[in-house]
C-alpha cells in the first residue's frame, strides 16, 4: 500500500536538450529531426518528458549533435524566469506555476510560453564541442547538464 502511494507521488523526470552544433555539413534527416524538436538554432534548448517515446527516439537520433541530461526543478524555474518567451506579450510569467505544469506533463504552449529557450553561449567556453561528454560537451550529461545551463543563462 505504501509503495503504491510512493509511485503516485513520484514526479516525471524532465530532460533538457541543448543544441550545440550548427547547420553546416549535417545530414538532411538530422537537420529535420532537430527542427521537429524545436532546436532550429545553435544554443537553443527544449525540455522533454522522459516517458515520451517519440521524442526520446528523436533524441537518440541526434545525440551526437546535442547535449542533454536531467534538469533540476530549481534550474528549470531559473530558465523559465530568464529565458522563457511569452506567447502573449501583455501577460506576466509565473515561473513556478509554469515549471510545475511542465513537470506534470502539460505542453508549454498551453501554459503561455514558447516551447524553446534561446541561451547564451556558455561562459568560459566549451571544452571541445566535437567530443562526447567526459572529454567534450556532446551527449548525455545526466545531472551535470545543470552546471552547463547555469553557465548559459
Image: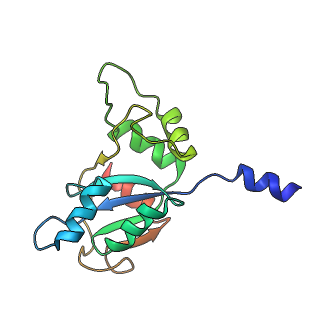
Q: According to the image, what is the colour scheme of the structure? A: rainbow
x, y percent for residue 148: 37, 60
x, y percent for residue 28: 17, 70
Farthest left residue in view? 24
Residue in front for this viewpoint, 73 or 147: 73
Tell me which residue sits at (16%, 72%) in the image: 26
x, y percent for residue 13: 56, 57
Residue 74, above or below 148? above
Residue 33, above or below 107? below
The total of numbered circles placed on residues is: 0
Farthest top residue in view? 90
Quarter of the rendering containing residue 32: bottom left
Residue 120, above or below 97? below
Residue in front for this viewpoint, 117 or 30: 30
Quarter of the rendering containing residue 139: bottom left
- Residue 124 visible to an observer of this rendering: no
- Residue 117 visible to an observer of this rendering: yes
Tell me which residue sits at (43%, 34%) in the image: 110
Tell me which residue sits at (53%, 33%) in the image: 97
x, y percent for residue 65: 27, 71
Quadrant in the picture for the N terminus: bottom right
Residue in front for this viewpoint, 111 or 121: 111
Tell me which residue sits at (39%, 23%) in the image: 92
Amino acid at each position: 500500500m505504501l509503495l503504491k502511494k510512493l509511485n503516485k507521488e513520484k514526479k516525471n523526470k524532465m530532460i533538457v536538450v541543448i543544441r550545440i552544433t550548427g547547420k553546416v555539413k549535417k545530414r538532411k534527416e538530422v537537420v529535420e529531426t532537430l527542427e521537429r524538436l524545436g532546436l532550429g538554432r545553435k544554443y537553443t534548448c527544449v525540455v522533454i518528458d522522459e516517458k515520451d517515446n517519440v521524442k526520446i527516439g528523436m533524441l537518440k537520433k541526434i545525440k551526437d549533435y546535442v547535449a542533454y541530461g536531467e534538469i533540476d526543478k530549481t534550474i528549470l524555474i531559473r530558465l523559465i524566469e530568464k529565458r522563457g518567451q511569452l506567447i502573449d506579450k501583455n501577460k506576466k510569467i509565473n515561473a513556478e506555476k509554469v515549471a510545475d505544469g511542465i513537470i506534470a506533463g502539460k505542453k508549454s504552449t498551453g501554459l503561455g510560453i514558447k516551447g524553446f529557450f534561446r541561451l547564451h553561449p556558455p561562459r568560459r567556453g566549451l571544452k571541445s564541442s566535437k567530443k562526447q561528454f567526459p572529454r567534450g560537451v556532446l551527449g548525455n550529461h545526466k545531472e551535470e547538464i545543470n552546471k552547463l545551463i547555469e553557465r548559459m543563462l
